[in-house]
Every structure is written in C-alpha cells, then in structure tokens.
Amino acid sequence: MSSRFRENIEEALFPPIVALLVALICGDLLIMSYGQSPGMVYRLLLEGTWGNAYGFGQVLYKATTLTFTGLAVSMGIRAGLFNVGAESQLAAGGFLAGLVGMGLSPSLPGILAILICMVAALAGGAIVGAIPGWLKVKFGAHEVIVTIMLNFIVLALLNYIVAARIHVPETLHTPEIANGVLPRLESFLPAFHGSAANLTILVALIVAGLSWVYLFKSKRGFEMRAVGLQPEAAEYGGVSVGGAWMRAMIISGAIAGLGGINYVLGYKHYYEEGFAGGSGFLGIAVALVGRNHPVGVVLAALFFATLSQGGLAIHAFVPKQMVEVLQGVVILAVAMSVPEVRAALRRARKPVAA
Amino acid sequence: MTGSPAATGGRDAFAIRMEGIDKTFGSVRANRGASLEVKPGEIHALVGENGAGKSTLMKILGGLQKPDAGKMAVNGRDVTGWTTSDAIASGIGVVHQHFMLVPTLTVAENIVLGMEPRNGLRFDHAKAVADVEKLSKETGFAVSPNAKVADLSVGEAQRVEILKTLFRGAKILVLDEPTAVLSPPEVKELWGVLRKLRDAGGTIVLITHRLDEVIEISDVITVMRGGQTVDRLKTSDTTPAQIARAMVGRDVVLSSRDEASALGAKVEGDGAPLEGFHPSDDMTSAIRVNDLVVMGSRNTRAVDGVTFSIRPGEILGIAGVEGNGQTELIEALAGLRPIVSGLMRVNGHDVTREDVSARRDAGVSHIPEDRHRRGLILDYTIADNLVLGLQADYTRRGLLNGDRIDENAAKQIEAFDIRPPSSELPARALSGGNQQKVVVAREMGRRFSILLASQPTRGVDVGAIEFIHSQLREARAAGKAVLLVSAELNEILALADRVAVMYRGKLTKVIPIEQADEEMLGEYMTGTRSETAA
C-alpha cells in the first residue's frame, strides 16, 4: 500500500517537474537571445516575487484567484466536462458580490456581510455554470462551445449593466461596497504593506480542502469521478450521469464565482469591468499542471502567480511577455510529458504481478 | 517476397488457402491450427459460435493480425504475415460489421475516399460521381451517388461499403456478419448482389451464425469451433442439423461439470459469499417478466414481447447467438434501458419503472456482459470497485466510510480469491479472470435474490470459469433466482435448469434442460427451427 502511494506521488509530481525543467531550458535560450544572463534574470524574478514581502503578497493575491479558477476547472474535468467558462463565472461572481455589497447596511456585523457577499458570489458563478450544464444534459450541447460562447455573452452583459446603469462617472467600475470588506494581510503583517493580498486566501485554502473532501471522501464525489472516468459504468452503479454533470457544472461555476471576492471584497471593494483579466482561462493551465488534484492546483496556482508577478520584476531586462511565453511552454510541456513520463515511470518499475 | 520458392502449392487452384494458422492473444488461443480453402468464384460460408476464431482468421487474411504460425496463400502466392496495404493491393476487400463510412459525406465521396480523382490539385467531384455511376451500372448495385450517407438505410450503407471495396479493385470479398443489421428484404437484395459478384468471377467469404442463410447463399461451408477448423461441407450435400452439430460439438468445459462442483464444495466451506442470506426472505417469489418490449440502438424492437419467470433456486439459461436482443433484455431488467411496454416484477413488486439503484435495493444483482465498459471503473481501486453501485450503503452523512470499504475489500478478496490480493491496486492492473472475480464478488457477495448474469465467463481463463460456475451453483443452492445469458452453449447446458433460446428478440418456449440437446438448441439459435413462447 505504501509503495502504491509512493507510485501515485511519483506519477503526480514527476511530469510537472520534467515540464518545468523543459520550460527552464527554453527560458534560458529566450533570455540569452536578448543578450542577458539567465542566472541574473531568474534571480531577479525570484527576488521580485518570493524575495520581498510586497512581491510575495502580490504572488499570494494572484495565486488566490488562480486557486479558485483552477479548482473550478478541475472539478469539471473530474466529471468529464471541460469548463472553459471560468472567466465569465468569475466575473459574474464578483459582480453579484459587489452588487449585494453595495446594498448592505453599514451597520450589519462585518462577518455577516462578508458571508452574504460570498453567497452572492457563489450564486453568480453557479448560475453561469448551470446554464451549460443544463444545455448539455437536456439537449446534448457540448459544454466547451457553450461555455466559450457564454463568456462573451456574460461579460458583455455585465459590461452593459455597469456602463449603462451603475458605474461611477469617468470609470468602468461600480461604487464601493457599503459593507463586507475582507481585511488585507497588511493589517496583520505590516510587511505586506501595499500588496493586494487579503484574507480571501484563507477562503481559497478552505475551498481547496473542501474540494478534496468532496472529490475523494464523499459519495457524490465518488459518483462524479466515476462519471468522468466511465459514464457507462457509473450508470451501471446507479449514478445519474446527467445529475452528476449538472452538479459538477454548478459546483465548478460556484467555485469560480467565489473567486470574485478576492478582488471585490479583498482588494478594490468594487466590481470593475475586466477585473478577471484572464484568470479564468489561466485556471485551465493551473488545473492541467496541478493534475486536477486540489493540492496540485494550489501549488500550480502559486507557480503561475509567481511567473506572472515575476514578469513585472524582470521587465527592465527582458520583455515581461517572456513569462507568458514561458507559461505557454510549461503548459505544452506538461500536456506532453504527462503520458510520456508516466510510461517511463511504469517501464522503470518492475511489472505488476499479473 | 514475391515468387518465393516456399510458396505453398505453387499455382494451386485456390483463391485463398490458409493452413495451420495459430494465433494467441494473452492467454486466449484464438486460432489453433485453423485452415481455410476457398476456390475462386465461390461463395464460402465461415460459420461457428462466438469465439470460434472466425474473425481472427479473417483479420489475419486481411493483414490486420500476423499469425504466430501457419501459412497462407492468395491465388497461389505465399502471403503469410502480409500487411493491410498488401492485402488491399492484392484485391482483398473486407466489409466490417460496423460500417466505416463518413456520414456527412455523399455516397460518391465515401466510395472514392483515399483514391479521389483529381483535377489538378482539386478534387474532381464530377468524375467521382461518374466513376461511381459506372461502377454501380457494372455491378448492378443501385446507389444514388449524391445522397448523404447519413440519410441512407442500413442496407444501402452496406451496399456503399461493398462498392467501396470493389472500387479499390477487390476480387476477394470478406463480409463479417453482413445480415446482422439488415431487414429480411434487404437480406434478399444482398444475396442478389453477392450472386452477381460470384457469377462475375468474384470470390466471397461470408462470416455468419445463421444457418438458414448459409444454406440459402453459400456453395461451400467451413465450420470452426474453439479456434480450429472442424468441418468442411458442400452446401448441396448437407443439412442445417449437420452444420449445427459441427458448430456446437462437444467441449472440455462440459465434461468438467463434476470437477467444478468439487471446487464449489470448497467454496461452500468458506461460507463468506453467502453471508447475510436468510432463506425466508427469498423463498416465496422471484422474478417475473411479462410481454417485455425494449428498443435497440437502431430503434428496432430488440426485445419483442418476452415473457418468463424464474423460481428461487433455479437457473434459467438464455442461449442464442449474440445480437438477438440478449444485451437489451438484460440491460432493461437491470434498469439501464427503458422498458417500452410489459411488466417486470421482483419478489411480487412491480419494478418496471424503477431505476438502477431501486432495482438493486429490491434484490437484483447484475454481472454485466462487458466488464471493461460497465462492470468496472478501471482506474478505481479494487476496494472502490467492490462497492460500485453499493456506495450508498457505505455512506454516512454524505461521506464514504473508508474503513468499512477496506474491510469489505479484505473480506471479498479473501472469499473470492482475487489476485493479487491488494485492495489499493487499480482494477486495470488485474488479469481478465481476476477483474471478473471483482465483479462477481461485488454482485454475489451481498444480499440479493435475483442474479442477472450476462456472459459471466467471457474472456476469462479456465480456472476462473470453474470458480464462477461454482459460485452460480452456490447461488442456486442458496435459493437465488439466476438468469444466465451466455453465448457458450456448453455453459448453459452445464448450469441451467431450464433453457430458452433468444432469436431476433423473441424467446422460444422454455424447455427443461433434460429435454434440450445441443443440436436442437443449435437449430433454434440459428433460426432453422422456431417455436415461440406463448
């Protein structure tokens, strides 16, 4: 059993590590093509992120949103669904949280206001997630197409509502919320001063923990993963495949939507057009590199957040777009290395008794 | 390669000559010294039960598989172990049971696909249509070149499939179960087409189970059984009964009846599989099915008015060639396929409209015919697979009870001798026999009153077959009602108390096993005899 456990860990960790090494080599070549020293650029990248409290705070802030969207995408994949709509689910969650927060009485206890806003965020994402789920179960519409198209529709709709109805003049954002602010980390640790990191990170870690329990310890999770692996066997096991899909899309959307509080409750305290800024799409990469496991997703979110923040730190020497190229290389390398590295690992081990 | 001095028989008179063909897949010997001799210009039927090795032999002929031993020659040229492209270039065309057509393309486009006529760099559509029309006229197969394949009937699609091979210059046509999907008038049409081809000098090998068809269309018959060629008959000199006898023959499994029950006694000693059984729960009633109608995937009545009942402590065997509605029947009884009309009662309760879980709770266990698709989640551990479908029983407040799942796994692995005995291994890592034992352990190692066992020993080794047979006998002895669907006649004869044959969605009259013999069942199975249950 312990050797089995070790094999699982190996199969989970090796492919991303191999992919990372491949990406590092590509990064070296890129940096050298700009006439810079890779060692120096990587050092700057680390110093600008993990090397000082502000940079680290920014990494944590970005990783928080990516944890939500990564968990959202991986929840879908576990049920055999590819949710490409985390971007609009995230925006819808943030929007509803902001809208509800605007209307709350300032006299309401803060913790209660936060919880109400969080429920609003969950609901916003869940509604946007439920639509492709329902269309798939009811009409067989492919969730990839529907979620992509819904991204356009939902983002345009929110844009219209904000621009036409409730924006603060001269801006693209709503008025600030009246209640429900999540404190920033700097109010506990002054070293984080200026960084956007806030208590949403705790919510993200709790959601990651709950996702793990749901997926691997609950009956619903057992059934949902069964549907993702072999729908016909799940059906044989008494599982309603459509029901599992519906649940997966609602949960996936809700998790992505909850990610919206990172910006709206924790950072700016208002909803702003375009705040999601691609975090929903990057969530796909996070889920992929994190191997759809909550622990992996948290680590992958930290990794992508580091790259993204690090791009700013090295901007003086190489274009910050270089890290986007690196992200792309990591994603490609992971996608390719997973089967390759697994096969190599299996070959290296003595065959399992037949 | 060409002109090899070792060529079998130099320029003998056979279009196809295969000799001593051996082919092993893992532990299964699909062909054991099989042979086939087909003369040019004849329609040659290749018959045998499921798993007799017909398809493997044809795959070797078509170059999809390489033989482990043996020789084969086409038109006198040694072609042992050739590739598919060699086979196609030498004029061998295989029409598979499942059509390989692109539904969104037209008939003409499908036929020329891969050998498209060109006009410079562009696809010459007009020439493709003209070519197909010409071919259609020459062969007398009416097709409309501009129709979309998606709009065709099954019979028309099959004609397109045949034309496709002829377009590639096939002189030897292999058809795998061509009539399985056709309606009777379409079958008649197909025969006309095949006769035309033969009269034009073509050679046709036809794989089929249906003896009425064999008699009607073929010139010569080769019978296979257990991977070997057992008989070669001239159609005009033979009777369906003779063919049926050759097809089912006798087999070692049947003679091991005593051996298997000896093994069963050992299992009884362990006692574990039957834990939780209380005779009083089950003795009063079992399963009753009235006039059941179930639709198949092609929107045909796959199960067409089936009625039967099983007493506690009885095994009802359903024999039959696959594809006559057995799959749909079992799936409908298990709750996996809607029942269009009719009634299903379990221990007196009407469960016709209940879902899978409700039927399981009502006492229905189900060993599905395809463990890789339905019976197991291959990436789940043995422990998790042992509770698939029972997950609700291992749940408290929404959370799975891991300790109880592990306990159950330890118990079942021991009781059913699952190897390797490691509950954390994914089901994928097990051999076929042990995978099937996981399914059997799950379905029989719990409280149940009715067992639907569909092809319970398919693709498993002899040891596992005997073990599973002994388990089924155990279940009978413990008062369970067992519905056994098997393509293996020997299995039915060895286990069942009563037997019915399923043919084209209907059941023949149920006969006590003492009155049944292979020859008679063979005739019912192949449709040469019919007496439908009232």
Image (cartoon, rainbow, N blue to C red):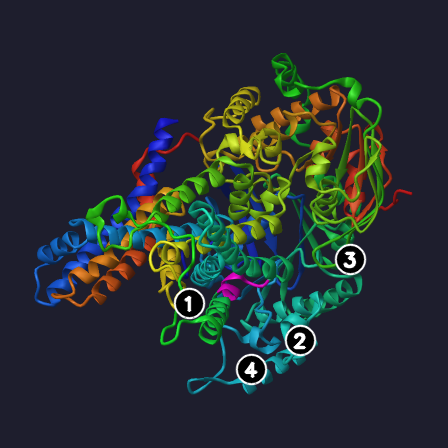
Q: Which mark is residue A174?
A: 1
**Nearer the viewer's eye, disc 4 or disc 1?**
1
Most common secondary structure along the magenta stretch: helix
Residue type of the residue flagged with mark 1: Thr
Number of other residues with Cα within 10 Å of mark 2, as a class: few under 14, some 14 to 19, many 20 or more: some
| Distance Cα–Cα, label 3 vs label 1 | 81 Å
Is residue A145 a member of the stretch shown in magenta? yes
Quarter of the image for residue B275 reads top right
Whole-number angstrom distance, CA of label 4 to CA of label 2: 16 Å
On the image, numbered disc 2 is attached to which residue? B139
Point out the stretch of residues depicted in magenta: A141-147
Amino acid type of the residue that numbered disc 4 sits on in the rendered structure: Ala
Q: Chain of mark 1?
A: A
On the rendered structure, is B232 left or right of B408? right
Q: Which residue is mark 3?
A: B216
Task: Kindly check if marks 4 and 1 are in contact, taking CB atoms under 8 A apart as contact.
Answer: no
Q: Indicate the secondary structure of the residue bearing disc 4.
A: helix
Residue to which mark 4 is pinned: B128
